[in-house]
Image: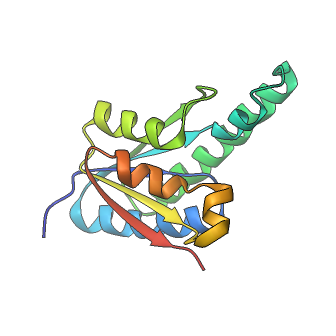
Amino acid sequence: MPQFKKILIPVDGSSTSNKALDYALAMAKDARSQVRFLHAMDELGYLSSYEYSGELMAAAHKNGTDILQAAVVAAQAANVPADTRLVDTPGQRLGQTVADEAASWNADLIVLGTHGRRGVGRVLLGSGAEQIIRMAPCAVLSIRGE
């Protein structure tokens, strides 16, 4: 089994994302790996036809910062070295954001949560996990939610 030394973990605060975070931290602890938590403020992309207000951007930034801080606390509790990256590139697809970060950080593995949507639900909502898997420059482990 390959040794993954740098594990990128996209986080959004959802229960599915948190399940992947827990799994990745257990892997990282066993392998003595370091992790990077990534939060992409991609939800702002849905508002591309609207002008961003300062309040909206501040609230989204605070939410992302809070999610990343909670992930760091979990990493500290597991004795896993971790850092964070908050990306707020409006209009950039989540898959591209994660792939770019994985490449620039030289990640060996991306661990992410997936909702496992199928059919019309996946077509209408899109699949962030599918985008990431297609675009990733390294191995991807998807952890299915409840």
Query: Is 76 left or right of 146, judged from the image as shown?
Result: left
Q: Residue at 53% of width from left, 70% of height from top?
A: 19
Rendered-image quadrant of the C terminus: bottom right
Rendered image quadrant of residue 104: top left
Question: What residue do we see at 55% from left, 33% from top?
Answer: 86
Residue drawn at point x = 56 percent, y = 42 percent: 39
Q: Is residue 59 visible?
A: yes
State the image coordinates of residue 137 (x, y, percent, origin top left): 27, 43
Position of residue 144 measured from the top left corner of the image (x, y, whole percent):
50, 74
Estimate the x, y position of residue 74 in percent, counting from the top left. Answer: 52, 59
Above-or-below relation of 119 to 67: below
Of the pair 2 and 69, the residue shown nearer to us: 2
Judged left or right of residue 26, residue 114 is: right
> Looking at this rendering, what residue extends furthest in the left direction?
1
The residue lying toward the viewer, choosing from 63 and 94, is 94
Residue 120 at x, y percent in the picture: 66, 67
Q: How is the image coloured?
A: rainbow
**Residue ID at (75%, 35%):** 60
Extreme-bottom residue of the structure: 146
Tell me how many marks there are: 0
Q: Nearer the viewer, residue 104 or 36?
A: 104
Establish if 93 lies above or below 127: above
Residue 81 appearing in the image: no
Quarter placement of the N terminus: bottom left
Pick the residue in front: 75 or 112: 112
Side of 49 where 29 appears, left or right: left
